Amino acid sequence: MLNYIYNIMKITFFLFFALLFALSSKTYSQTTVSGIIERETRWSAEEGPYIIVGDILVTRRASLVIAPGTQIIIKDTTKSEYLTVPFDKADSTLISIRVQGALTVVGRKNNPITFTPQTAGAANFGWRGIIIDEADSRYVEIAFAEISGASTGITIKKSNAIIRNNVIENCNIGIHATFGGSPRIQNNLITSSFAAAIKVERSNPQISNNIIAFNKNIGVWCDNSSRVRFRYNCLFGNRDGNFLDCDPELGRLSKVNKNKDSTDAADNIILDPIFVGSPAEARAIALDVNVPTDPSKVRDTAIFRIVNSSSNKDAKDTNGSDGDSEEARVRLSGKNRFILSKYSPCFNAGDPSRRFNNSDGKRNTIGPEGGPEFLND
């Protein structure tokens, strides 16, 4: 009998520790990566987070597929520890993911892929960024990703890559299109960039349906010679201006869209995108609540005077707060800090072409919430 009980206890303890080990392994699972990728490679959320300790180079005949929900962390280190081929002078001191072959970074609206430096912070550019280096455009797409803390979030060299539905924040430059190509930059949010949200040099990008807001210097920095197709975007709160060396007609309001908002000749709006929880939303709510009712349509005038007086007081309290600073507007808390408020002018203000329609079939909403989940073109 005692032997039987002893055996049961041994089995119980064995199962307990096996389960504990399995749970701990899953909780603390991570994969360290660096070096050259020369074949088809897949990164998944289950095997992550992926800690990048040195340059990643995806060669011409190789591919890297990153699945939804995957977390990529770039370690604080220097390239001197690893044998790599530098992209340029800036690249020689910072880790990068350089792609010459195929790259599929496609998350989901509710399950994005994230790229963050090990040490995050304002103006702390802990890595070089993703570099699309003359890769075949048919096999390159970055969508539903969150990219932060890079010297340049995404560099596109001689490629027509698709960059869509991403949030790019706290980089020196958000997206840099250079050395030819016509990359398609659609439905992104680019914010808190130090130098510029988008920089264009000797390239002809197609830029549409993006929110470019609250950047510390320039919104869009052109070279005054590239042919940039810039339409149906929302720009606001870029400290040193929305445009530099771009088409002079950009930003010059001359039309009115279907939402009755003023636009420039290329249908761009220069308005606060209004995110949920922002001071701009609080003001919009106050204004909405306090739209005066025609007194001639009020039956009980005594109650009308009480309600109207109370509402005006609330509006004054709401609008009396500071709340107009860039930090107050951008640094919202929580996972959904960049969700558009129902008062946003970005809804149904994007490119009306059917291929840009939202998942529900309605006209494109400017920003990462808009457009289809999956592209058909």
Image (tube, rainbow, N blue to C red):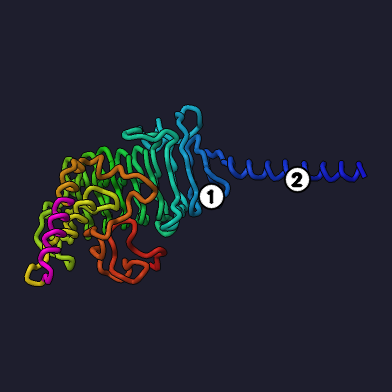
315, 223: nearer the viewer: 315
Task: Name the kind of residue labelled 1 in the image.
Answer: Ala
> x, y (%) of residue 115?
43, 44
Q: Nearer the viewer, residue 91 or 275?
A: 275
In this rendering, position of residue 346 left or right of residue 143: left
Ranked by sequence position, the earlier of labels 1 and 2 is: 2
Q: Amino acid at mark 2?
A: Leu
Res 45 label = 1
What segment carries the magenta color? 298-314
Where's residue 206, x and y in %? 27, 57
Horizontal arrangement in the rendering, residue 57 relative to residue 322 (left or right): right
Q: Mark 1 or mark 2: which is in front?
A: 2
Majority SS type along the magenta span: helix
Image position, residue 348 (x, y; %): 25, 65
Q: What residue is drawn where x is 38% and y is 45%?
A: 147
Q: Quadrant of residue 109?
A: bottom left
Residue 15, label in figure: 2
Q: Which of the two residues, 282 or 196, is positioned nearer the viewer here?
A: 282
Image quarter hosting the C terminus: bottom left
Residue 302, above or below 86:
below
Q: Is residue 232 visible?
A: yes
Residue lying at 82% horizontally and 42% vertically, measured from the top left: 9
